[in-house]
Image (cartoon, helix red, strand yellow):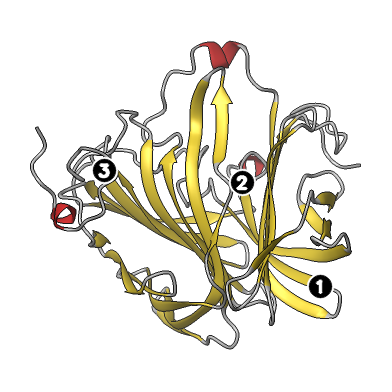
Amino acid sequence: MAAPAPLDEYPIHQTPLSLARVGTSDRNFYDRSYFNAHDRDGGTMLITGLGVYPNLGVTDAYLAVRRNDEVRSVRFSDALGDRSLDMRVGGYRIEVLEPLQRLRVVCEHDELSCDMTWTGAFPTVQEQPHLILTGNRPIIEASRFAQVGSWAGTLSVDGTDIAVDPAVWTGTRDRSWGIRPVGETEPAGRAAAEPSGGFWWLYVPLRFDDFAIVVIVQEEPDGRRTLNDAVRVWPDGRTEQLGWPRVNIRYRSGTRIPVAARLDLTTPDGKSLEVEITPGTGVPLHIGCGYGGDPDWLHGQWKGRDWSEFRRYDLTDPAIAPRIPYGVIDHVAHARCGSAEGWGLFEHASLGRHDPTGFADWAAVAP
């Protein structure tokens, strides 16, 4: 029987278990924070986060910064102790200053560090549940909320301090928890012989002066939509659903790297709402950030106690560049919605077959 955890002092239980345990024995249960930050012109883009994996007994965190064609990445991992309100691993910590509104992210490392405070520009948005099945088994079954906002503080790269001015630095964040593949790779079994054939994903949270827009679309190879969520958020917390987004993405010739996109949305009164997006600098989440396909380090992977590592990735290196298209890439997004100008994230993955785009297989690229 698990001993009581510090969280058990609070009236927040949802199962007849101590909060030292989670309500499932699935090894892939996770609870994670994700943040991005950028200086709008694309000169610097930062991705960071912290995760807890109770059934693997691991907690970890990372900070990755792209400047020019280089990604610098530092990551920390350790054994998970008592579950509590303390979000800390190695030289990394997240402090909740005001729940759902202000957080402080601190990373202490000689090569790459930060002390930055996040302030939400609009209230958080609860997204639609995220479910992906392999056969009848959920491989992703998660809840998530998102927010757009600004950053203030200092980022230090190779010993040089960069002032993070909230008038310039913006970004998005999310908190998610549930089940998704984490830790050491499981045997693929039947899925290896009968793969899905492709994966298509789009996640676009955008911050404008007077409102925010959050769009999520996930499609199967034949174009069947398995996740559709589009909302506009107002400063007082009101949200309006924006229908069934029609997505048009233009890719750089010979690649699947997006260079322009248009989202055709519909307001509740039936009016058209068009968002034009120019994706900019991108950080591949599977190169330095620990997401699926990263051969160096994966979230939840056991690396031993008190482990940390710093790496540099030259995205033009012939040993690295060919891997970039085969994962999710987070781009700085510059957007227009009527006369309103906005900034945010254009997160996209187009892997394998996707009939609506005309990609027939894994090797297909834009003409």
Residue of label 3: 58
Question: In which quadrant of the rendered view does residue 340 lie?
Answer: bottom right
Q: Residue at x 56, y 35 (%)?
A: 131
Circle 2 packing at 10 Å, graded few (<14), some (14-19), many (20+), is: many
Q: Which mark is residue 328?
A: 2
Q: Nearer the viewer, mark 3 or mark 1?
A: 1
Q: Nearer the viewer, residue 50 or 6?
A: 6
- Residue 259 appears left or right of 93: right
Q: How far across and how far down the image is residue 194, in percent?
A: 62, 13
Percent x, y of residue 11: 22, 56
Pointer 3 or 1: first along the chain: 3
User: Could you tell me the amino acid type at mark 1?
Assistant: Arg
Local packing at callout 3 (Cα closer than 10 Å; few below 14, some 14-19, many 20+) is many
Which residue is drawn at the image coordinates 25% and 48% (left, top)? 13
Q: Report if the CB atoms under discs 3 and 1 are less than 8 Å apart.
A: no
Amino acid carrying mark 3 in the image: Val
Q: Earlier in the sequence, mark 3 or mark 2?
A: 3
Identify the residue under disc 1.
336
The residue closer to the viewer here, 237 or 25, is: 237
The label on residue 241 is none
